[in-house]
Image (cartoon, rainbow, N blue to C red):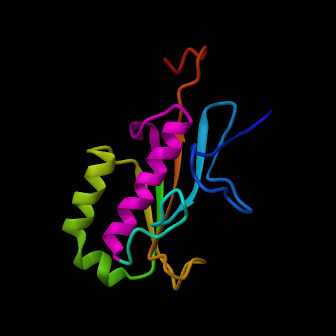
């Protein structure tokens, strides 16, 4: 069984991890994405901007694997500031819908003391089911 590493074209190389891994059965595992772009440069130090960028990164990895945001089945969020998340839920929802539309997969949110990248305020990982050609259950 061979897994395929998914790395969007033009992105800086991932060092010591894979952005995405697609299994032969079509399950895509997206590693935790943070608020930096494909060049690994943070878009902002604002929570909502970082959250939106992390979701955009996930969407781009899913697209690179041949899927769409509607194929995402699970998101796990790691946030460093619960109070800011709660205070900005309207903005969070608006940013979420800009990327994900009205697709709401299973989600978990975990409050953490910190993330590996010091500037990161949120990290989001995902699982998606990507249609595979020739499989009757994946039209």
Give the residue displayed 32% in from the left and 49% down from the top: 99
Question: Total marks drawn?
Answer: 0
Magenta span: predominant SS is: helix
**Pick the front one: 66 or 110:** 66
Q: Quadrant of the N terminus?
A: top right
40 above or below 118?
above
Q: Magenta segment: does it hold 24?
A: no
Q: Report the side of 53 relative to 84 (left or right).
A: right
Q: Report the side of 50 relative to 2 (left or right).
A: left
Q: Magenta segment: does it hold 50?
A: yes
Q: Position of residue 30 (x, y in %)?
A: 57, 51
**Pick the front one: 123 or 35:** 35
Q: Which residues are magenta?
A: 46-73
Q: Position of residue 12 (x, y in %)?
A: 61, 56
Q: Position of residue 137 (x, y in %)?
A: 53, 19
24 above or below 28?
above
Give the residue displayed 22% in from the left and 66% down from the top: 91
8 above or below 44?
above
**Pick the front one: 44 or 26:** 44
Give the residue displayed 52% in from the left and 31% down from the top: 66
Give the residue displayed 61% in from the left and 14% down from the top: 134
**The quarter of the displayed image where residue 14 is located:** bottom right
Q: Residue furthest left?
A: 90
Q: Position of residue 139 (x, y in %)?
A: 48, 17
């Amino acid at each position: 069984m061979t897994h395929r590493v998914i790395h969007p074209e033009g992105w800086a190389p991932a060092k010591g991890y894979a952005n995405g891994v697609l299994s032969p059965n079509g399950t895509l595992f997206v590693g935790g994405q943070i608020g930096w772009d494909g060049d690994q440069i943070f878009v902002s130090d604002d929570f909502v901007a970082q959250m939106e960028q992390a979701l955009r990164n996930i969407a781009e990895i899913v697209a690179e694997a041949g899927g769409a945001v509607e194929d995402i089945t699970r998101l796990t969020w790691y946030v460093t500031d619960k109070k800011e998340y709660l205070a900005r839920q309207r903005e969070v929802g608006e940013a979420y819908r800009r990327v994900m539309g009205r697709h709401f997969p299973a989600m978990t949110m975990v409050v953490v003391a910190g993330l590996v990248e010091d500037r990161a305020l949120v990290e989001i990982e995902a699982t998606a089911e990507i249609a595979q050609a020739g499989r009757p259950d994946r039209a």
